Image: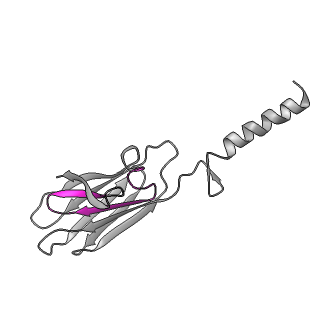
Amino acid sequence: MGSFSTLALSLIISLFFATPFTIEGKPFQSPPVTVNIKNTLKGNYQLTVHCKSGDDDLGVHQLSPLASYSFTFRPNFWGRTLFFCGFQWPGSSLHYFDIYKDIRDRQRCNDTLCLWNVDEHNICLFNYITKMYDLCYTW
C-alpha cells in the first residue's frame, strides 16, 4: 500500500474512533444523568427513599411532602447502568423499583434528566412527549 493510502486509512480510523465515542473531550463517556424523585403522597406523609446500584449505596433520605431527592451519575458505556430504590411511608410495606434502567430510560429521560413522582399507588415518570407524569408503574 502506498504512503498516501496508509495515511488516508489511518486518518479514517482515527476519526471513526475519536468522533462518535467522545463526549466533552473524554472518550467512551456518556453525558451525566440526573434522577429526581418527588414525594407526592397524599395525607402529608414523609417518604423514605434508599437508592443503590451495584457499585454505590446512596444512603437513606427522608422526603417531606412535595420534597425531592436527586442524584447524578454517568451511565456506563455498555448501556447496563441500573439504580434501584426502596420506598416506604407510614402504614405501607417496603416497595422496590428500578429507578434507572439504561435500556428502558435513556431515551425516555431525554438522555439527561429522569423526573419521578411517588404516590401511594404508583411511581410515574415524566413523559417528555406528552409533558405529563403518565409513564406509571403500580406498586
Query: In screen coordinates, is 106 left or right of 98?
Result: right
- Residue 101: percent from left, percent from top: 37, 48
Q: Quadrant of the N terminus?
A: top right
- The colour scheme of the drawn protein is one colour
Q: Is residue 60 depicted above or below 22 in this figure?
A: below
- Residue lying furthest left: 91
Q: Is residue 50 above or below residue 83?
A: below
**In this view, 65 is above or below 115:** below
Residue 32 in picture, x, y percent from top left: 50, 59
Give the x, y percent position of residue 126: 31, 59
Q: Identify which residue is drawn at 84% across, 31% down.
A: 6
**In-image side of 10 versus 98 (left or right):** right
* Magenta stretch encompasses residue 93: no
Residue furthest toward the top?
1
**Residue at 25%, 57% in the rendered image:** 124
Q: Which residues are magenta?
A: 106-126
Quadrant hosting residue 8: top right
Spot occupied by residue 13 in the image (x, y as percentages of width and height): 73, 37
Q: What residue occupies the far front of the structure in this picture? A: 130
Tell me if residue 40 comes above or below residue 79 in the rendering: below
Q: Which residue: 61% across, 46% down? A: 21
> In the rendered image, which quarter is residue 51 located in?
bottom left
Q: Indicate the quadrant where residue 26 lies.
A: bottom right
Q: How many marks?
A: 0
Considering depth in this image, is 83 or 119 the residue closer to the camera?
119
